[in-house]
Image (spheres, rainbow, N blue to C red):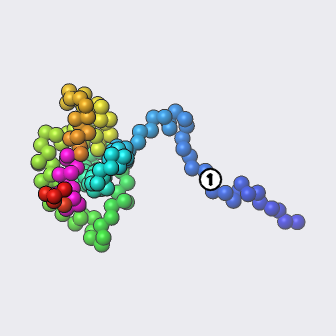
Amino acid sequence: MTKFRSKKALDPPALDMGTEQTRKRLKPDPIVSAAQKWRKANMRDAPALEASAREIRRIYQMVASGQLVRATDLSEVKTHGVHVNEWLAQRRRDLYIPWSKLMGHRMDIFVDWLIMEVPLIQCDRKLRKRNGYTSDLIERSLTLYSVMSGAIKKDPRL
């Protein structure tokens, strides 16, 4: 006599989405929400700004990973055959450090938004500004980084 297995035994386990209370507390990634806003406004540089924000976060997390309490996944680093340490050293030396020096005192607001995931409204309150000042600051900062990296071409005709 043969026994038949039920279909439930063959199905992979369902993805655990957590409890309803946990799902309510989850916050969207600030880069994703900002990129959606840029695309909705039909910004032509939206993909370059999103890529720059992801690269800045990746560099920051790789450099400060020993000091951050959060668990980080560094498997998404794509290097095109260059070892990760060489890629990190080159990008940090050529782009990140000069860009962060140009940012000056505004760098703490950028880190609050990008790394600590503080909402833009709270960043505005911290600066005692209104009407999306922090959002404009972040767009200008990412545009500067994108221009420095060559993702956005500086063309006087545009």
Residue placed most toward the observer, 5 or 142 = 142
The percent coordinates of residue 97 (x first, y second) are 14, 53
| In the image, residue 45 lies in the stretch drawn in magenta | no
For residue 124, what is the image quadrant?
Answer: top left
Residue furthest to the front in view is 157
Name the secondary structure under disc 1: loop
Query: What residue do we see at 27% from left, 54% from top?
Result: 45
| In the image, residue 147 lies in the stretch drawn in magenta | yes
Give, as a three-letter code, the residue at label 1: Pro
Position of 150 relative to 119 (above/below): below
Residue placed most toward the observer, 7 or 138 = 138
Residue placed most toward the observer, 130 or 70 = 130
Query: What residue do we see at 20% from left, 46% from top?
Result: 140
The percent coordinates of residue 110 (x first, y second) are 23, 42
Residue 58 visible somewhere in the drawing: no
Q: Which quadrant, please, contains the C terminus?
A: bottom left
> Is 18 situated left or right of 37 in this image?
right
Query: What residue do we see at 33% from left, 64% from top?
Result: 78
- Segment colored magenta: 140-152
Q: Which quadrant, please, contains the N terminus?
A: bottom right
Please name the residue that numbered disc 1 is placed on.
13
Residue furthest to the right in view is 1
The percent coordinates of residue 73 (x first, y second) are 37, 54
Position of 114 relative to 90 (above/below): above
> Is 79 situated left or right of 20 in this image?
left
For residue 6, what is the image quadrant?
Answer: bottom right
Query: What residue do we see at 62% from left, 53% from top?
Result: 13
Mark 1: few/some/many CA within 10 Å (<14, 14-19, 20+)? few
The percent coordinates of residue 153 (x first, y second) are 19, 61
> Is 50 situated left or right of 96 in this image?
right
The rendered magenta stretch, by its main secondary structure, is classed as: helix
